[in-house]
Image: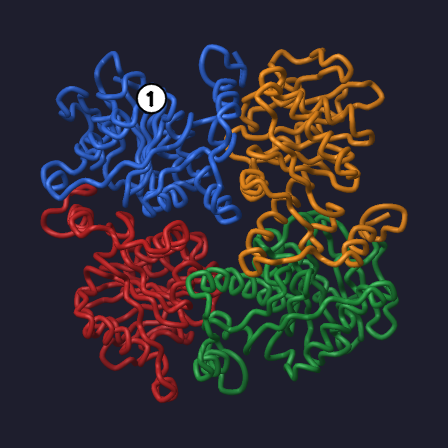
Chain colours: A red, B blue, C green, D orange
């Protein structure tokens, strides 16, 4: 079952290494069958090139129970589940340790919108999610990572559909989208924006975010009812 | 019609990703049939690898009316049209979000000529074009982007043939040339010069532009009546 | 003899260049047959693509005597031998001049743990090994390099299994693991962590190491008796 | 005639782009037939992939007269000739605009020896050659570039065999070697050393050159009568 979704999840995972986002096995992509309440995710620690559709893990969204796949799911699966439960409308999640975005995570800095490349994918600052406490780590590290991300968006009043990504302090980025491949594209965009922000801040340490009217224009020409980028 | 021009526009677009200038669909190349008054340009949001000659959009230079191609043209088409109308002698335009050049755009800094690599392609500083006002964005974002670029060259007394490129504030570079492939080469050169300028300014924060007599020599050995670089 | 080990040592050496860690012949991987007391290592100065199993050098761990292979072993062989003798449980060693890790070596700075990517591979700071004295260089440069590395771990109270790598001042990194391919993976991880640390320190010059409870969690979910990353 | 030399010059030129040193046509390699007094060099402005042995230009060392090849030689040919005439024992020259080395050229900084990677190829600082005066440019730009490089080594008391490369102010690096492929390898090494120096200086702005006894050891284990790196 879930043949099409598995196929897209597989394809997005296979693209992680050639996209330059991932070395070794530092990344995973999942997809959601919202109607069936099932998540498809990469198995843990398996090299991408040897992955086949049947190796993917299928997990019930409500219970977290694995219902298909003989391999253990990604250890980050509870983070993915928490995001799917809290962010209605997302259908794919991508987690990588891509170098420039992870550099911002490690440095403890959110990523403001410094240009139109950013605005095309993220409608404003990509927020920084706090680190977990020792108690949260002890209790349920991966699940609580998801809860902390959800808290970041709720307390900051940020729409996760308009800003489909986050940088977790000390860790790395998560992005999402309506599909697994869109989640991957947002990881590619986030990495490029982080790389360019590193250079832009070097040239101009006091750099301010891009003016609001250009942010609005670039985001809305690509997203929402009045969009006109791409094909109908 | 326009078979040769379409072929070159297609080839230049296909090279954007392997050249390292473009991720996802962040770039477009156009070409001009000056005699026929027609512009050929990439369709909007279509991946480069799946492009075929017939997918390209043909647009009348004077009216902006699409006369061929079933897909919507690049959303940046009005910018291209404005440049072809104002800069006689150019036959190709290339727009990318290449990382180092976009870094200068985002930081709000023009790119002075710091070495012979730059001088071989751009006869002096690659200028920074201002951002549009809210009114200009509202009225016609892409068309007014072109007008602002033209204004940058007119008011600055810069010859667009000698300096075939610009960095737009908050956005990214545009380059041009006598053909679509020459426009692409100028984007490759601009990216490399921006990357090297980032490092040169790190090593020497007070770096001055290269002396004029070397700029003159390098530019003129490659361009104009006394040039002797390359084959006859 | 040693067919499987030779095969893995060959594969790890061949991967050095495509992994982005090595240019020219600046790197070598070895493997240990602990039961037989034999080390297999790359021959000196031979391009990786032309290597075959029979070209590898086999050296006795105790005596340093070459017992197989017509080519001269890597000039760094005495360093490898010193590490195998002093660090029980390691089965592979990888030496490269990978650019970011070598940058830290040249700058004379150890690499603190700035994030979970680092914690997944190195349980704390990757230490800096001092330079050799003129007398040590004169007496036995490569052997004494190994002794200085061993001294770094002994005097610093560092467990070489938990922190499988070192940066040698003025020189470059060495990493190790239970197998040659794991040693290579640790070189890939070290390079990526050094690259991200360069950027993280630029964004935040006073960056502190990651909190201990997250270091513990990430390292222990991947290593040791309670680990749950990957497949059983 | 010169079949073997032409073949090696061709191969070295073809490797410039895949090696990451060159974009577009920004580089050229030559080789010397010292006995015959003939230099073989790339033609000007021709893409590397379309080069064939017969396209190469053959030029008399003494007269500078082209004696073979229908295409115009590289515009930098007079620089190459000046170096072959002044530096006995070199058999190949490589000129690129590789990004990190060119960054040092543009910033006007020589490249001190910050580590063993550098010492393996260059026995000390790679010097900076001054810019030409307006008169020198006017009289013979390319020939005088060669003379200025020769002057840099003579006045600085630098042995061009021990330090086979130079950075020209505002311009880019030249390297050489006993063969065209060794000249290329030295360009690869110089680029990597410049890249690592950029990072090392960022981590440690007051970085001193590597101690002399390690420079001596690393250089002499690879070069000269007592060398033991590589195969006999």
Task: Say whether residue B56 is visible.
Answer: no
D54 vs A172, nearest the viewer: A172
> x%, y% of residue D216?
81, 54
Q: Residue at x 53, y 28 (%)?
A: D25
Q: Within the image, what quadrant is residue A142 found in?
A: bottom left
Left or right: where B174 falls relative to B228: left
Left or right? Give the position of D56 relative to A187: right
> In the current view of this chain or complex, which residue is farthest to the right?
D225
- The N terminus of chain B, quarter of image: top left
Q: Residue at x 45, y 56 (%)?
A: A17
Left or right, D156 with reference to A38: right
Residue closer to the observer: A76 or A196 = A196
Q: Looking at the image, is C140 positioned above or below residue B130?
A: below
Residue A205 location, quadrant: bottom left
Q: Which residue is mark 1?
A: B159
Q: Secondary structure at mark 1?
A: loop
Front in this rendered view, residue D39 or B12: D39
Give the mark count: 1
- Is D119 placed above or below C131 here? above
Residue A221, placed above or below residue B225: below
The numbered mark 1 sits on a residue in which chain? B
Q: Position of residue A107 (x, y in %)?
A: 41, 67
In the shown orientation, is residue C34 left or right of residue D190?
A: right
Which residue is pictured at 64% across the width and 67% down the height? C167
Q: Height in image: C45 above or below D83?
A: below
Question: Of B63 and D89, which appears nearest the observer?
Answer: D89
């Amino acid at each position: 079952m879930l043949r099409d979704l598995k196929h897209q999840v597989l394809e997005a995972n296979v693209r992680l290494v050639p996209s330059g986002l991932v070395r070794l096995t530092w990344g995973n992509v999942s997809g959601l069958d919202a109607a069936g309440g099932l998540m498809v995710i990469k198995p843990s620690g398996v090299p991408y090139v040897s992955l086949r559709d049947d190796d993917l893990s299928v997990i019930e969204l409500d219970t977290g129970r694995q219902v298909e796949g003989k391999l253990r799911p990604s250890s980050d699966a509870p983070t993915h589940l928490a995001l799917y439960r809290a962010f209605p409308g997302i259908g794919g999640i991508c987690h990588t340790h891509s170098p420039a975005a992870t550099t911002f995570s490690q440095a403890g800095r959110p990523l403001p919108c410094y240009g139109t490349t950013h605005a095309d994918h993220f409608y404003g600052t990509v927020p920084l999610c706090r680190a977990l406490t020792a108690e949260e780590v002890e209790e349920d590290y991966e699940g609580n990572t998801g809860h902390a991300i959800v808290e970041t968006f709720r307390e900051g009043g940020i729409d996760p559909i308009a800003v489909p990504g986050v940088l977790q302090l000390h860790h790395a980025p998560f992005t999402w989208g309506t599909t697994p491949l869109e989640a991957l594209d947002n990881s590619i965009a986030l990495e490029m924006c982080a790389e360019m922000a590193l250079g832009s801040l070097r040239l101009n340490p006091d750099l301010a975010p891009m003016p609001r009217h250009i942010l609005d224009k670039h985001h809305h020409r690509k997203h929402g009812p009045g969009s006109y980028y791409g094909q109908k």
